[in-house]
């Protein structure tokens, strides 16, 4: 089965450090999402890309977060500087919602980030 | 923006039927997804509705009424493994998908 690969699976870092999370979407999917999940906020949409172009990053704190898709096989989410309130599970998901919505999105296993 | 509401928690008995409701308000509606998420795992896709009516997939069915901004997920012949969080997500014409907070379903013997 095709899968979305996220690295690292777990990350513990000190406040103020830079964190980079990576995602390899499923080949052929044209839309990539970054979500953050916490107990308090549920699944929040941070940013998404279609055909590698950023469409909406309004859910992301712009001063410290950045999302890029340098090529079709890699999406990145960076936090600099990290803060304890950024502790969450970060999910990447890919799909082709405009052409194949009946398959939904496939989520990666997530990156569990802890900022101390 | 989008406003999506689901009950926070539900409890049901093994073998029974449970209906999980989702109401939404959005502009540019272009379909509604249901996902299942077990504790500590990623969400997995269950169903997609874009037209009014019922879509059936084995023990799971999903219903949509666009005029009412309402959907439900129906789970039949409940099994213990169905204990999970169920998330509805609204898709827009721009292909943006926003999730509700999820309904935690507990299935008891």
Image (cartoon, helix red, strand yellow):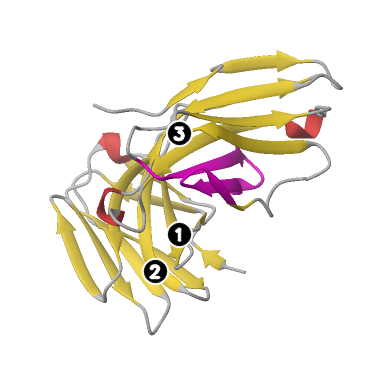
The chain holding disc 2 is B
Instruction: Report the quarter where the N terminus of chain A lies.
Output: top left
The residue that mark 1 highlights is B95
Q: Residue at x 34, y 28 (%)?
A: A3
Q: Give residue B6's position: percent from left, percent from top.
A: 48, 61
CB contact under 8 Å: marks 1 and 3: no
Instruction: Report the quarter where the C terminus of chain A lies.
Output: top right
Q: Residue at x 30, y 69 (%)?
A: B50
CB contact under 8 Å: marks 1 and 2: yes
Magenta stretch?
A29-54
Per the image, label 2 sits on a secondary structure element best described as strand
Observer-side mark, 2 or 3, equals 3
Q: Is any atom of residue A69 visible in this view?
A: yes
The chain holding disc 3 is A
Q: Give residue A32's position: percent from left, percent from top.
A: 48, 42
Tell which circle, 1 or 2, labels the residue nearer the N-terminal end: 2
Residue B52 located left or right of residue A52: left
Q: Give residue B103's position: percent from left, percent from top.
A: 46, 52
């Amino acid at each position: 089965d095709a899968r979305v690969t996220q690295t690292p699976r777990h990350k513990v870092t000190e406040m103020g450090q830079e964190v980079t999370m990576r995602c390899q979407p499923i080949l052929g999917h044209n839309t990539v999402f970054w979500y953050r999940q916490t107990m308090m906020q549920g699944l929040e949409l941070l940013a998404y890309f279609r055909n590698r172009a950023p469409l909406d990053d309004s859910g992301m704190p712009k001063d410290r977060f950045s999302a890029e898709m340098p090529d079709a096989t890699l999406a990145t989410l960076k936090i600099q500087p990290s803060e304890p309130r950024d502790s969450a599970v970060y999910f990447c998901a890919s799909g082709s919602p405009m052409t194949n919505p009946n398959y939904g999105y496939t989520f990666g296993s997530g990156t569990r980030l802890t900022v101390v | 923006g989008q406003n999506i509401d689901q009950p926070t928690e539900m409890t049901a008995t093994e073998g029974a039927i449970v209906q999980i409701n989702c109401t939404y308000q959005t502009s540019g509606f272009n379909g509604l997804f249901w996902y299942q998420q077990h504790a500590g795992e990623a969400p997995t896709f269950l169903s997609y509705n874009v037209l009014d009516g019922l879509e059936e997939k084995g023990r799971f069915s999903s219903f949509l009424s666009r005029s009412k901004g309402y959907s439900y997920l129906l789970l039949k012949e409940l099994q213990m493994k169905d204990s999970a969080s169920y998330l509805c997500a609204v898709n827009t014409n721009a292909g943006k998908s926003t999730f509700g907070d999820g309904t935690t379903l507990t299935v008891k013997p």
